[in-house]
Image: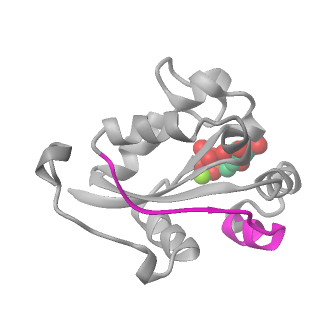
Amino acid sequence: MTQRTFAIIKPNAVRSALVGEILRRYETARLKIVGAKLLHASSQKVAGFYAEHEGRPFFPGLVEFMSSGPILVLALEGENAIADVRALNGATDPAKAAPGTIRHAFGPTMGSNVVHSSDSPESAAREISYWFSADELFSYEQKSSVADV
Ligand code: UDP
Ligand code: MG
């Protein structure tokens, strides 16, 4: 089933020039970029995004980290996009992430694990609309090569 998911390339990955490498992995897995923005979120904006984790011990550090510099927010579309992007990203703790995943490759720690992605259709819908307005989202026919565009 074609579906949309939401992902973030976190501030340490933007700072470390990993944007191209991470996008390449998503695009190679046949995910289409239907929304993309580089932005520096306020701590309030990040806290609202991660509201489900409010009150947990890691929450203040997570909010501080995610608002420490520019992030790339993404809406991605493809067959089974939600599960596929979670699989490409790997386990939350990079030390437990499988070889070949983004978090295994780039870590570095649980608190700064390079990428975010939605965990369900409900969170994908909420997260896409939290960061994007309707006119910032696009759709187009799947093309198999640049020459077909
Ligand atoms: N996190 C953390 N310590 C924890 C659990 C989570 O620092 O014990 C951070 C981690 O960066 C994670 C984010 O909080 O990516 C959101 O947690 P979640 O359990 O939703 O993991 P995810 O969906 O990102 O894999
Ligand atoms: Mg999560």
Residue in view at x 46 percent, y 64 percent:
124
Queried whether the magenta region covers residue 25, the answer comes back as: no
- Vertical relation: 110 (above or below) 119: above
Where residue 71 appears, x then y in whole percent?
Answer: 67, 55
Q: 92 or 137, which lies in front?
A: 137
Toward the front, the furthest residue is: 147
Indicate left or right for 137 with 15 as reference.
Answer: left
Residue in view at x 57 percent, y 72 percent:
131
- Vertical relation: 46 (above or below) 26: below
Residue in view at x 49 percent, y 53 percent:
119
Residue 48's image quarter? Answer: bottom right
- Vertical relation: 49 (above or below) 69: below
| Residues in magenta, as a range | 31-50
Residue in view at x 77 percent, y 67 percent:
47
| Quadrant the C terminus occupies | bottom left
Where residue 97 appears, x then y in whole percent?
Answer: 57, 25
| Quadrant the N terminus occupies | bottom left
Where residue 32 appears, x then y in whole percent?
Answer: 32, 53
Toward the top, the furthest residue is: 99
Indicate left or right for 135 with 61 as reference.
Answer: left
Where residue 4 appears, x then y in whole percent?
Answer: 35, 61
